[in-house]
Image (cartoon, grey):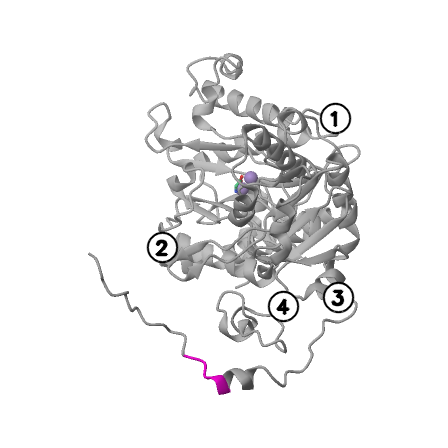
């Protein structure tokens, strides 16, 4: 194999002649950002940064936006910054690739970024670089503009490695940006724990939403409700298509891209027994009018907040009696869960309340081999055969928000005003489950709503979408008649 000639695979980049390079370097008008341009929610970010700086006073903290991920060959996935970075900076766009928020040991935050390339200085990046050049992917901010947008001191990303040459104690939000992880080096076991503490603190910082965040989440919920109506309007065409689930996914996702940044997670469109697959995102099935449709979807706003709503709808427009029985049991469970929400309640209370209703209903149907009380015992849990997952989670910038929070502040903690969460009990009656009467096999139902904890209870944010059998049938009837 010695002396093999180098492979010549050619290039799609046409050569740039010296004459063209000289021509490109000249005569571009200034295009400054408007002087009052600020990230949305500008006023809310300094307090968050101050809280995290205070928690780790005297240490340097690095919170990266992340890097592009290759989809295949020379195509990358669309970039979306890490939620911790968006939460501390308000920067949410695709141009944040590789940027890093640093909180210095004295508490001062500094944004390290790749500034807009300087055309006058002879850099050809702006027209030659397919990944970062503004002729290819659009304009970025320069250092002064980024400072104006965010109120942060800014520095060139090229200066980031210098931060690792000193002796300041440093913590990194790890596993977000391989470049930053490589600069930090392989962490010792002790350092990995310290980095994990930063990740937990950043998650916990998001447990309570400020009023601006609640507004963003309400916007997301409202766009999501509009997307659900789009899906119902698309039903007649979808029922005629051999992959009706995909047609409906497209209808929802079109709304998500039109109104926001996209979907907050992969849309679940599950007809019939597909609804018994908890995360059915293949969405490649046909629709049978005799079956139910489970739609679990959320629009992510441009500020990156997402709703997470599920409705289970009769594809014919009307529930059969077996579908109605199963639906009303899940609805009663959700009502019980919602009634348990209040400041000071344990996070796990609403799940327990919902699961008690489910277990009692299953026992009444004669499905459980033991009484409900026994099935609910921690050393039993037999009811879970029909409802395997948890009944809710925090919601915010991430669909499963605050996931790195310590158990004592989240899963084993108590609810507080300003928390936003889902309540989403379900029944997943597998098509091949011989413990079930045949009429119930293959029915999957989840009802999922988004709520904000208030001073004395909880406010249903997604109440614009009906939840009752009658409410759903008349809402669908109205949408289908209007067409
Ligand atoms: N859509 C994911 C969930 O409901 O948690
Ligand atoms: Mn959910
Ligand atoms: Mn969901």
| Mark nearer the viewer, 3 or 4 | 4
- Crowd band around label 3 with a 10 angstrom C-alpha radius: few (<14), some (14–19), many (20+): few
Q: Which residue is mark 3?
A: 37
Residue contact at pointers 1 and 3, CB within 8 angstroms: no
Magenta residues (range): 15-19
| Mark nearer the viewer, 3 or 2 | 3
Q: Which residue is mark 1?
A: 344
Asked whether residue 184 is in view, the answer is yes
- Crowd band around label 1 with a 10 angstrom C-alpha radius: few (<14), some (14–19), many (20+): few
Residue contact at pointers 4 and 1, CB within 8 angstroms: no
- Residue at (55% x, 61% y) in the render: 257
- Residue 243: mark: 2
Q: CA distance from mark 1 to mark 2?
A: 46 Å
- Residue 126: mark: none
Element type where label 1 sits in the image: loop
Kindly report the secondary structure that dominates the magenta region of the rendered protein.
loop
Q: CA distance from mark 3 to mark 2?
A: 45 Å
């Amino acid at each position: 194999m010695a002396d093999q000639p180098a492979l010549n695979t050619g290039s799609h980049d046409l050569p740039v002649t010296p004459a063209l390079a000289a021509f490109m370097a000249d005569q571009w008008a200034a295009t400054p950002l408007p002087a009052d341009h600020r990230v949305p929610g500008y006023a809310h970010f300094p307090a968050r940064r101050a809280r995290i700086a205070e928690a780790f006073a005297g240490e340097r903290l690095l919170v990266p936006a992340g890097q592009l991920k290759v989809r295949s060959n020379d195509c990358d996935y669309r970039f979306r910054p890490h939620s911790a970075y968006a939460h501390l900076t308000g920067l949410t766009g695709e141009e944040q690739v590789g940027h890093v928020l640093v909180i210095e040991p004295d508490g001062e935050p500094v944004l390290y970024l790749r500034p807009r390339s300087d055309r006058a200085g002879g850099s050809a990046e702006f027209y030659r670089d397919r990944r970062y050049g503004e002729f290819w992917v659009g304009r970025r901010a320069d250092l002064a503009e980024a400072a104006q947008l965010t109120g942060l001191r800014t520095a060139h990303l090229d200066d980031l490695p210098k931060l690792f040459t000193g002796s300041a104690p440093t913590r990194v939000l790890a596993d977000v940006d391989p470049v930053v992880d490589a600069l930090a080096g392989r962490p010792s076991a002790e350092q990995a724990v310290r980095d994990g503490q930063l990740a937990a603190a950043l998650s916990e910082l998001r447990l309570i939403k400020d009023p601006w965040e609640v507004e963003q989440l309400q916007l997301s919920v409202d766009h999501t409700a509009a997307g659900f109506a789009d899906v119902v309007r698309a039903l007649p065409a979808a029922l005629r298509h051999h992959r009706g689930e995909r047609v409906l996914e497209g209808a929802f996702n079109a709304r998500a891209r039109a109104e926001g940044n996209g979907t907050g997670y992969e849309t679940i469109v599950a007809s019939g027994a597909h609804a018994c697959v908890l995360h059915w995102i293949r969405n490649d099935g046909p629709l049978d009018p005799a079956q139910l449709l489970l739609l679990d979807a959320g629009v992510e706003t441009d500020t990156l907040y997402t709703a997470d709503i599920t409705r289970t709808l009769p594809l014919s427009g009307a529930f059969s009696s077996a579908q109605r029985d199963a639906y009303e049991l899940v609805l009663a469970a959700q009502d019980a869960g919602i009634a348990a929400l209040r400041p000071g309640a344990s996070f796990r209370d609403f799940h327990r309340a919902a699961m008690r209703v489910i277990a009692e209903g299953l026992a009444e149907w004669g499905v459980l081999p033991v009484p409900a009380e026994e099935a609910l015992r921690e050393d039993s849990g037999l009811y879970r055969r029909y409802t395997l997952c948890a009944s809710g989670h925090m919601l915010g910038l991430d669909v499963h928000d605050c996931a790195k929070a310590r158990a004592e502040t989240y899963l084993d903690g108590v609810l507080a005003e300003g928390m936003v969460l889902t309540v989403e009990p379900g029944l997943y009656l597998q098509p091949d489950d011989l413990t079930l009467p045949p009429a119930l096999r293959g029915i999957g139902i989840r009802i999922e709503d988004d709520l904000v904890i208030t001073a004395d209870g909880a406010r249903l944010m997604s109440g614009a979408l009906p939840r009752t059998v009658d409410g759903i049938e008349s809402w669908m009837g109205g949408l289908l008649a209007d067409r």
